[in-house]
């Protein structure tokens, strides 16, 4: 389905006037309709399947593709991933030329959080397709939280570390979603 700005009510979910090309972020990325495609939790431990291993490996490799990005805690869960990324603004070298792109992509800042997550999701999808795992899909957006201080960072690290232990109470667990 092609994007039609008149029929799609998509509002910006990023913080206005925030430079997403630097900072520390807690990121959550979900599978389409929160389907458990990455594996399962057994006795409080995540047991990744092939798609889960691909998602893990690609996340782990983000700093190899974005030299300005540092990794911190992350956890692949059955239907989502949580991770902490630190983005440092690279020193400006030379002039950057803008290639003519379709209008809806012009606001994508190179090496920003959105471009990093878009690249990550594309890499996982491409590797899944190459392995014949055509049923894999992402949710279209992702959630981020700007980490502003060390207390916030430690709280989020602990949350990520304990995420698989707390799966039975997690809102993302399909068993906990209320049917309407």
Image (spheres, rainbow, N blue to C red):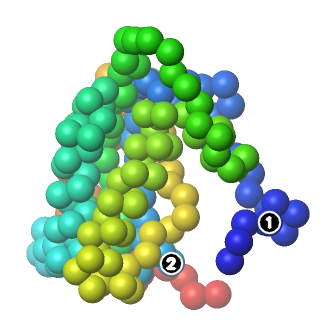
In percent of the image, x 40 and y 51: which residue is there? Answer: 119
Say if residue 23 shows up in the picture: yes
Residue 133 falls in which quadrant of the image? bottom left
Residue in the foreground of this view, choosing between 156 and 113: 113
Point out the tag, 1 or 2, that comes first from the N-terminus: 1
Q: Could you say where residue 150 lies in the image, as x and y percent from the top left?
A: 32, 22
Q: Which residue is mark 2?
A: 33
- Quarter of the image holding residue 54? bottom left
- Residue at 81%, 60% (x, y): give it: 5
CB-based contact (under 8 Å), mark 1 and mark 2: no
**Percent of width and height locating residue 163:** 26, 58
Picture residue at 44% right of the left edge, 24% below the top: 22
As drawn, is 99 to the left or to the right of 142? right
Residue at the location (57% across, 88% down)?
179
Mark 1 lies on a secondary structure that is loop
- 33 and 132: which is toward the camera: 132
Q: Which residue is mark 1?
A: 4
- Which quadrant of the structure image shows residue 69? top left
- Residue 50 percent coordinates (x, y): 17, 77
Mark 2: secondary structure: helix
Q: Distance of mark 1 from mark 2, alpha carbons?
A: 22 Å
Front of the two marks 1 and 2: 1
Quarter of the N terminus within the rendering: bottom right
């Amino acid at each position: 389905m092609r994007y039609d700005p008149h029929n799609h009510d998509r509002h910006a979910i990023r913080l206005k006037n925030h430079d997403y090309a630097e900072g520390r972020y807690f990121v959550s990325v979900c599978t389409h309709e929160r389907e458990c495609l990455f594996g399962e939790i057994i006795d409080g431990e995540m047991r990744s399947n092939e798609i889960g291993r691909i998602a893990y490996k690609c996340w782990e490799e983000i700093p190899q593709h974005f030299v300005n990005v540092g990794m911190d805690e992350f956890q692949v869960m059955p239907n989502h991933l949580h991770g902490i990324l630190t983005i440092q603004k690279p020193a400006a070298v030379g002039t950057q030329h803008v290639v003519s792109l379709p209008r809806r992509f012009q606001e994508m800042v190179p090496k920003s959080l959105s471009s990093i997550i878009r690249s990550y999701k594309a890499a996982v999808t491409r590797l899944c397709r190459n392995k014949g795992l055509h049923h894999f899909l992402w949710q279209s957006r992702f959630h981020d939280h700007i980490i502003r201080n060390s207390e916030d960072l430690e709280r989020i690290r602990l949350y990520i570390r304990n995420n698989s232990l707390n799966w039975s109470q997690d809102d993302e667990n399909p068993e906990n979603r209320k049917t309407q």
